[in-house]
Amino acid sequence: MDTLLVLCTGNLCRSPMAAAVLQRALPALHVMSAGFKVHPFESADALAVRLMRERGYDLGTHRTQPLSSWMVRAANLILVMETSQRCIVETLYPGSRGKVFRLADTQGLDVPDPYGRGEAAFRHALQLIEAGAVSWIDRLTRLTSKSLSKDVD
């Protein structure tokens, strides 16, 4: 396990926030983020930047990028925000089946898109992102540890 891809609709809010949380907690992994409906090279949403800065994360250098086939091939795990996004990825890229999951799967939740919905919606989405990330961080830490111990043996 070395590459993780996080997806949302526009790559402006949810996926960059989730990627930042996951990258900090799992520095040995390469964490990418992308979106389905993207205007390339836009900055992250200003509210996302501010809320993440409050938590010590820097989204200032983030630029949006569209999902591409090389990302899907490179990723060992793909985390999406909504069930419908999982279906889209698996339909567009049939080889991705078995490695696409919702970020908040263990909570049984989609992470709703806060774009254009104000600060309360962003805070709610970020709470769900952080909770979902915690469950994945635990699982990925165990997987990475097992992989490293096999490499040493």
Image (tube, rainbow, N blue to C red):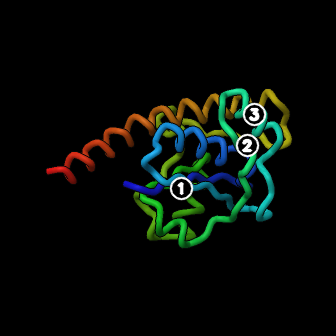
Q: Amino acid at mark 2?
A: Asp
Label 2 residue SS: loop
Residue 73: give x, y in percent of width and height.
Answer: 47, 69
* Mark seen at residue 113: 2
- For the point 45% across and 39% down, the residue is 136
- Sequence-wise, the earlier of marks 1 and 2 is 1
Quarter residue 138 falls in = top left
Residue 54: give x, y in percent of width and height.
Answer: 72, 27
Left or right, 5 with reference to 59: left
Q: CA distance from mark 1 to mark 3?
A: 21 Å
- For the point 19% across and 50% down, the residue is 152
Left or right, 131 with reference to 63: left
Quarter residue 97 falls in = bottom left
Residue 18 vertical position relative to residue 130 in the rendered view, above or below: below
Label 3 residue SS: helix
Q: Could you tell me which quadrant the N terminus lies in? A: bottom left
Left or right, 10 with reference to 26: right
Determine contact: label 1, label 3, CB under 8 Å: no
Residue 95 vertical position relative to residue 115 in the rendered view, above or below: below
Return the residue nearer the eye: 33 or 117. Answer: 33
* Front of the two marks 1 and 2: 1
Return the residue nearer the eye: 113 or 145. Answer: 145
Return the residue nearer the eye: 57 or 6. Answer: 57
Determine contact: label 3, label 2, CB under 8 Å: no
Q: CA distance from mark 3 to mark 2?
A: 8 Å
Label 1 residue SS: strand
Q: CA distance from mark 1 to mark 2?
A: 18 Å
Which residue is tagged 1?
5
- Sequence-wise, the earlier of marks 3 and 2 is 2
* Mark seen at residue 122: 3
The local crowd at label 2, few if under 14, some if 14 to 19, many if 20 or more residues have their Cα within 10 Å, is some
Left or right, 7 with reference to 132: right
